[in-house]
C-alpha cells in the first residue's frame, strides 16, 4: 500500500525519517508515523483525532468533500432506495450482499434472538419512570454480559458472531421495553411473525387492550432511517467501541460504551437536540436571531444538526432524509410546521457567509427527528433509535477489529503540569 515517500527532517540533529505513505482503496494518502518516536524522538499532537487514522477498515467509505458515503462499496443512495435494514446489516457484517437463501437464514437468526431474559425486564422496572432511555439502554446493554457469560470467549469466532447477532436482535426489544416502562405499560414481547421494523413498532406501541396494526408507511420510513444510521466509519461512538474492544472487553461492554458516547449532543444526541432547538425557535420569524446566536463566539448556542467533522459538503444522508420527510408526512396525512421551520433555518444558514465559509451543512440529525416525530416516537427516544441502527455498525467494526491483529488503544499526551517537586507536611503548607 505504501508507494509514495514523505520525509521529515529534524534540523537540530540532521536526522531524516522517511514516512511511508499508505494509500487507501480510493487513493486517500495517509502518513505512517509509527517510527517517529523511536527514530526522531517525537510524538504527534492531534486533539480530537481530526488528522489521525486509528485503523484500517473495509466497511464504510466517506468522502467528506464530495458528500460520498458507501457501505462495503455500495453508495448509500442505492441502498436507501433498494435495500432493507436487515440486508444492509448482513452486508456490513459479512462484506457482501446476501443471496436470498443467506438473507432468509440471517433474518431467521435475528428473529430467533429477539427475546431477552425475563430478569432484564425486572432490571428495567427498577428505573425511575422518567429516566432518560439512553441512560437505561447503556445500563441494560452492559448487563447483557451477565446473561451470556458462557458464550463470551472473544477468541472464539462463533461466540463473537453470536454476540453480534444477539445485540442486533435485542436492541429493539430493550429499547421498546425502556419506552414502555416510561409509559407505565406492561412489557411488550416481540412478535416474531413480524419483520424487523414492524416488530419494533409493534413492541413500542401495541397495548394489551387493543389490536395494533403496524403502518406499512411507518415501517418503511423506519427501515430507511435505520439503513442511513447503520454505520459511519470511525465516528466518536464507533471509535469508542473499538477502543474498549482493543482491551479484550466483551462486546456488550463495548456497545454499552458506544451507547454512552452516542448520547452526547455533539454526536447522536443531536437529533434530540435539533427538535428541542426547533421547539425553542418556535417561529420562522425567530430564525435570524438564532442564526446570529450560532455565529456569536461568546454564545455557546450552536445550530444543532449542522456541521460535521468529515462532511464539508451536504451529508448525503440528510439529503435522503429531507426528501423522505415530505413523503412520510404526506403518506401519513400529517403536517408538521417544524418541517417548514427547519427548511427556512437551512435556507437562511446556507445563504450566510459564516456557514458557507466554515462549510457547515445539515447533517444526518437535522431532519431525522421530523420523521421520528411523525411516527409517534417521543423526542427522548430519538437517540435510542440511532443506537438501534448503529449497533450494526458498532458490532461490524468490533468484529473487524477482533479479526485483525490489534494493539490496545493508548494515546499519548502533551504533559502541561508542574515539574518535579517535594512533598510538604501538612503543618508546613500555607
Ligand atoms: C453525528 O463523526 C460522525 O460521523 C458522526 C455522525 C455519525 O453518523 O456517526 O455523522 C453523527 O454525530 C453528526 C453530528 C451531530 N452533531 C451536531 O449536529 C451538533 C452541532 N454540530 C457541531 O457541534 C459540530 O459541527 C460537530 C461536533 C458536528 C463537528 O465539530 P468539529 O468537526 O470539531 O468542528 P468544530 O467544532 O471545530 O467547528 C469548526 C468551526 C468552529 O468555528 P471556529 O472555531 O473555526 O471559528 O465551525 C463552527 C465552530 O464554532 N461550528 C458551528 C457549528 N458546528 C461547527 N457553529 C455553529 N453551529 C454549528 N452547528
Image (cartoon, rainbow, N blue to C red):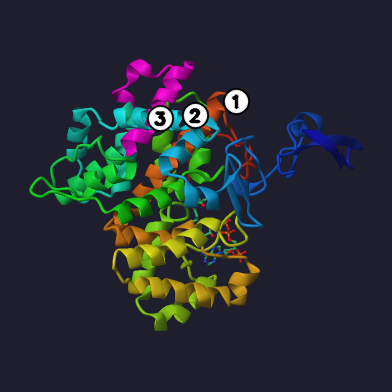
Tell me the chief SS of the magenta region. Answer: helix
Q: CA distance from mark 1 to mark 3?
A: 28 Å
Please determine whether, in this image, residue 341 is positioned above or below residue 157.
below
Which of the 4 quarters of the picture holds residue 316? bottom right
Please determine whether, in this image, residue 267 is positioned above or below residue 243.
below
Left or right position of 232 against 166? right
For mark 3, give the secondary structure: helix
Q: Is mark 2 within 8 Å of ligand 1?
A: no
Q: Residue at 19% across / 28% down in the picture?
A: 119
Please identify the residue farthest to the right as the structure is shown.
14
Query: Is residue 216 part of the magenta span, yes or no?
Result: no
For mark 1, give the secondary structure: loop
Residue at which label 2 appears: 245
Q: What residue range appears in magenta?
A: 145-171
Q: CA distance from mark 2 to mark 3?
A: 24 Å
Residue at which label 3 appears: 106
Residue contact at pointers 1 and 3, CB within 8 angstroms: no
Q: Residue at 33% across / 38% down in the picture?
A: 171
Mark 1 / mark 3, whichever is N-terminal: 3
Say which of marks 1 and 3 sits in front: 3
Amino acid at each position: 500500500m505504501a508507494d509514495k515517500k514523505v520525509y521529515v527532517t529534524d534540523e537540530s540533529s540532521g536526522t531524516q525519517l522517511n514516512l511511508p505513505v499508505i494509500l487507501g482503496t480510493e487513493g486517500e494518502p495517509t502518513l505512517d508515523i509509527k517510527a517517529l518516536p523511536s527514530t526522531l524522538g517525537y510524538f504527534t499532537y492531534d486533539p480530537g483525532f481530526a488528522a489521525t487514522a486509528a485503523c484500517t477498515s473495509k466497511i464504510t467509505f466517506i468522502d467528506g468533500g464530495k458528500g460520498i458515503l458507501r457501505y462495503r462499496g455500495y453508495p448509500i443512495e442505492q441502498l436507501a432506495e433498494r435495500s432493507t435494514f436487515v440486508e444492509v446489516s448482513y452486508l456490513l457484517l459479512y462484506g457482501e450482499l446476501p443471496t436470498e437463501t443467506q438473507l432468509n437464514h440471517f433474518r431467521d437468526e435475528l428473529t430467533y434472538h429477539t427475546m431477552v431474559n425475563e430478569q432484564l425486564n425486572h432490571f428495567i422496572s427498577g428505573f425511575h419512570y422518567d429516566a432518560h432511555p439512553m441512560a437505561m439502554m447503556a445500563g441494560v446493554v452492559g448487563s447483557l454480559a451477565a446473561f451470556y457469560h458462557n458464550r463470551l470467549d472473544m477468541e472464539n469466532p462463533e461466540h463473537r458472531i453470536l454476540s453480534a447477532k444477539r445485540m442486533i436482535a435485542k436492541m429493539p426489544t430493550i429499547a421498546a421495553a425502556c419506552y414502555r416502562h416510561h409509559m407505565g405499560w406492561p412489557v411488550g414481547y416481540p412478535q416474531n411473525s413480524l419483520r424487523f421494523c414492524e416488530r419494533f413498532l409493534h413492541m413500542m406501541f401495541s397495548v394489551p387492550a387493543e389490536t395494533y396494526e403496524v403502518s406499512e408507511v411507518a415501517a418503511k420510513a423506519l427501515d430507511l432511517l435505520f439503513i442511513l444510521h447503520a454505520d459511519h466509519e470511525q465516528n466518536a461512538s464507533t471509535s469508542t467501541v473499538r477502543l474498549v474492544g482493543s482491551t479484550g472487553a466483551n462486546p456488550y461492554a463495548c456497545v454499552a460504551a458506544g451507547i454512552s458516547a452516542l448520547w452526547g449532543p455533539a454526536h447522536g444526541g443531536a437529533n434530540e437536540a435539533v427538535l428541542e432547538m426547533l421547539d425553542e425557535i418556535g417561529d420562522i420569524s425567530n430564525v435570524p436571531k438564532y442564526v446570529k446566536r450560532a455565529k456569536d463566539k461568546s454564545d455557546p448556542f450552536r445550530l444543532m444538526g449542522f456541521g460535521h467533522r468529515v462532511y464539508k459538503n451536504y451529508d448525503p444522508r440528510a439529503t435522503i432524509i429531507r426528501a423522505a420527510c415530505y413523503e412520510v408526512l404526506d403518506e401519513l396525512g400529517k403536517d408538521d410546521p417544524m418541517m417548514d421551520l427547519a427548511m427556512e433555518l437551512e435556507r437562511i444558514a446556507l445563504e450566510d457567509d459564516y456557514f458557507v465559509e466554515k462549510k457547515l451543512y445539515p447533517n444526518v440529525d437535522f431532519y431525522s427527528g421530523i420523521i421520528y416525530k411523525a411516527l409517534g416516537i417521543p423526542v427522548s427516544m430519538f437517540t435510542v433509535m440511532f443506537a438501534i441502527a448503529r449497533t450494526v455498525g458498532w458490532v461490524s467494526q468490533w468484529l473487524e477489529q477482533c479479526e485483525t491483529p490489534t494493539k490496545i488503544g493508548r494515546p499519548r499526551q502533551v504533559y502541561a503540569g508542574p515539574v518535579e517537586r517535594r512533598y510538604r507536611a501538612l503543618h508546613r503548607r500555607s
